[in-house]
Image (cartoon, rainbow, N blue to C red):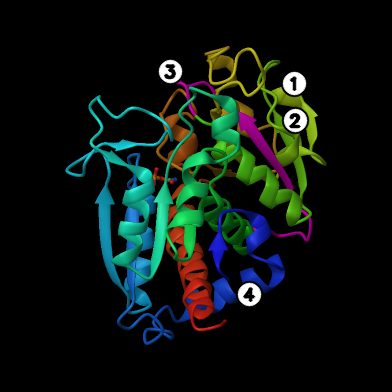
Amino acid sequence: MKVFTSVKDIGSLDVAIKEALEIKKDRFAFNELGKNKTLLMIFFNSSLRTRLSTQKAAMNLGMNVIVLDVNQGAWKLETERGVIMDGDKPEHLLEAIPVMGCYCDVIGVRSFARFENKKDDYEEKILNQFVKYSGRPVFSMESATVHPLQAFADLITIEEYKTKERPKVVLTWAPHPKSLPQAVPNSFAQWMLAANYDLVITHPHGYELDPEFTSGAVIDYDQNHALEGADFVYAKNWSAFKDPYYGKILSTDRSWTVTAEKMALTNDAYFMHCLPVRRNMIVSDDVIEGPRSLVIPEAANREISAQVVLKRLLEGISKP
Ligand code: CP
């Protein structure tokens, strides 16, 4: 594998899940693969899980790790070509990226949607410059439109807990006080559909996601109806995708919060969320703390999804 920015890069999901479960049984089995190889993790945005799990996965593979928080201690980076750089950004991404590539063998990038220009966000302007100019294998640690390491971990978790071949999985919008990107729900939908699960997406009118990611899912504007018979409930907030409201909050309706009453409509479903989560906005305390909550095993599987991806990128370095 030379790049990991989407479900399309992982190949067969059956093979990837099998590989993940093998790695989980013995996470140090390939600790020679990354010897004398360096991972550079570049964060344009904050992180807890991605930072720790990816670093741990790299260490399991014997890699050295450098972490760069672009907004803390590095020069502020200009990202637009053609700009007269007389402002507060002393370095351009077009020099910074190949320089970063000099110091490492693999690069992970976290760069969220900026909500300044939908076209730039959905063309993955920042991430694609790393792919183009770094000269190194690049993987997404959540980009403007997708979070594939998270969705892969979600898929591994569902495979571990499901009791039927094709579970009903409900992705439900839930309220949040800040405007959040669509990356997690986009990826979740894309990976669940690729896994051929019965995917239902429920949200208020106006929160329709990009059909590129959701085509094939049932869209149900009635959350209670959508939850009926669900085996897994995946809660997430996202801002509007559709113009002219791209990146805007259209609702903070707390009747969409996932509560015990909502979960009672399901087939004793497991509750999932990528974290961090706003309690009693997205989900009630009793649901997230309850016996059907998978938020911690799901976060733990971030180490495994990252390790499969890093392993494949390291194997790709040695292949022409
Ligand atoms: N789920 C996730 O990506 O968490 P962080 O933002 O803390 O990395």
Up-down: is 156 above or below 235?
below
Q: Determine the quadrant in which ligand 1 lies.
A: top left
* Earlier residue among tags 3 and 1: 3
The residues tagged by marks 4 and 3 sit, at their Cα atoms, a distance apart of 39 Å
Q: Which residue position is annotated with label 4?
A: 18
Q: How packed is label 4: few (under 14 Cα within 10 Å), some, or many (20 or more)? A: few
SS state under label 1 = loop
Q: How packed is label 1: few (under 14 Cα within 10 Å), some, or many (20 or more)? A: some
Please report contact status of discs 3 and 2: CB closer than 8 Å, yes or no: no
- Residue at position x 60%, y 35% from top? 122
- Residue type highlighted by circle 4: Lys
Q: Is residue 116 found left or right of 63 in the rendered image? A: right
SS state under label 3 = loop
The residues tagged by marks 3 and 1 sit, at their Cα atoms, a distance apart of 22 Å
Please report contact status of discs 1 and 2: CB closer than 8 Å, yes or no: yes
Q: How packed is label 3: few (under 14 Cα within 10 Å), some, or many (20 or more)? A: few
Please report contact status of discs 3 and 1: CB closer than 8 Å, yes or no: no
Residue 155 visible within the image: yes
Q: Which residue position is annotated with label 3?
A: 177
The residues tagged by marks 3 and 2 sit, at their Cα atoms, a distance apart of 24 Å
Is the residue indicated by label 1 positioned so its CB lies within 8 Å of ligand 1?
no
Depth check, mark 3 against mark 1: the one in front is 3
Q: Which residue position is annotated with label 2?
A: 226
Q: Which mark is residue 222?
A: 1
Depth check, mark 3 against mark 2: the one in front is 3
* Earlier residue among tags 1 and 4: 4
Is the residue indicated by label 3 positioned so its CB lies within 8 Å of ligand 1?
no
- Residue type highlighted by circle 1: Asp
Depth check, mark 4 against mark 2: the one in front is 4
